[in-house]
Amino acid sequence: MRYEDKIRIREAITISNQFGDPIWKGINDIPFVVLLVTDSVEFLINHPYPSDDFKLSENDSLLKTRIFYRARRFPNWYLATFPAVNGVNCIVVGTPENTGKKSTDWTITLLHEHFHQYEYSYPDYFQSVDKLGLSGGDQTGMWQLNYAFPYDSLVIVNQYKKYTGALQKALLHINGSSFKKDFRAYFAERNKFKKLLNEADYRYFSFQIWQEGIARYTEYKFLQALDSYTPSKEMAGLNDFISFPAYKEEFWLKEKSSLIKLKLEVDKRVCFYAIGFSEGLLLDKLNPDWRNRFLTDKFFIEKYFKK
């Protein structure tokens, strides 16, 4: 396994250990298991009981764990979390080169995926998802990507634009004198969007906001915590590293712009990431304790606005 990949993974684990629990209580109780997919080999890190097809590569002093390997099975561009090895939720991730990322954002993306490990590890997660009644009998989980949401409905697309435009305005004015008025306008447009969807489609939308949108929000919460953080000298020495504060500014600009730049009929479920990012920050403003309910009162994050 490459030294540079070890450095990036170690940095993500260090950041989670230092800052994870104040963001999501208990996240560091969840094993940070990574399956790194290279062009020809998969490396398994922090897995408690690897399957028999893995062989020991090394007992690594940098990551302070055993690293196992096998021939590649998954696509080398993956960025996903699922029970890939012996039923354990693994961050299955390609290298920065194969995922189109640089060291800083690749490391932060690992924290996004570790948040999914946190979600999936809650005892009733899978039963609760089943109760949404959205899978159509699909047992692979691919329905989460392929659900037939009405992305092309003109009336829904038009209301989506009003909703996300109002959301962006509320986000930009979050510390301003007009915030209460802007929030009410946003919430009204959100409710109009909700009423245009049938119940199943709204459950799917809400599930995506809860799962993927709040994962994107979690990336930003880690970046906020890193304002005074000093990265390891090995991480800072990588030739494509940019500082975490500099990346935080890039991240903010991209996400707030995505609210109105992404088109529902073109970008489809990817649109929901920026919505969850933005609504999570509004929740922080109006109900700072909302994250305490996240795992026990799932899927409909608008309920968290009520203290």
Image (spheres, helix red, strand yellow):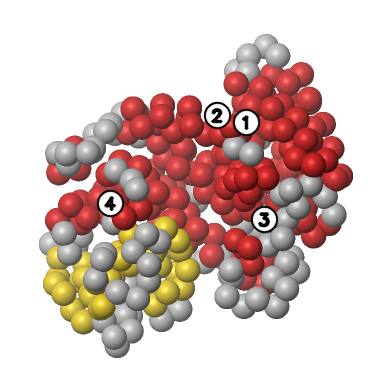
Residues tagged 3 and 1 counted as in contact (Cβ below 8 A): no
SS for tag 4? helix
Q: Secondary structure at mark 3?
A: helix
Q: Amino acid at mark 3?
A: Phe
Q: Residue at x 64, y 27 (%)?
A: 168
Q: Nearer the viewer, residue 285 or 191?
A: 191
Q: Which residue is mark 3?
A: 207
| Callout in the foreground (3, 1) | 1
Q: Is residue 144 visible?
A: yes
Inspect the image, locate mark 1, and give the three-letter code of the amino acid beneath it. Answer: Ile
- The Cα–Cα distance between marks 4 and 3, rounded to whole angstroms, is 31 Å
Q: Is residue 266 left or right of residue 89?
A: right
What residue appears at the point 42 percent right and 58 percent down from the top-left corner? 79
- Give the spatial CA distance, label 1 vs label 4: 29 Å
Question: Looking at the picture, which amino acid does disc 2 mark?
Answer: Ser
What residue sits right under mark 2 in the picture? 257
The Cα–Cα distance between marks 2 and 4, rounded to whole angstroms, is: 25 Å
Is disc 1 surrounded by few (<14), some (14 to 19) or many (20+) residues within 10 Å? Answer: many
Q: Quadrant of residue 86?
A: bottom left
- Where residue 35 appears, x then y in whole percent? 33, 67
Of the image marks 1 and 4, the number of the one nearer the N terminus: 4
Residue highlighted by disc 1? 260
Q: Is residue 101 left or right of residue 233?
A: right
Image location (x, y in percent) of residue 293: 65, 50
Mark before the other along the chain sequence, 3 or 1:
3
Nearest to N terminus: mark 2 or mark 4: 4
Quadrant of res 271: top right
The amino acid type of the residue labelled 4 equals Glu
Q: What residue sits right under mark 4 in the picture?
A: 97
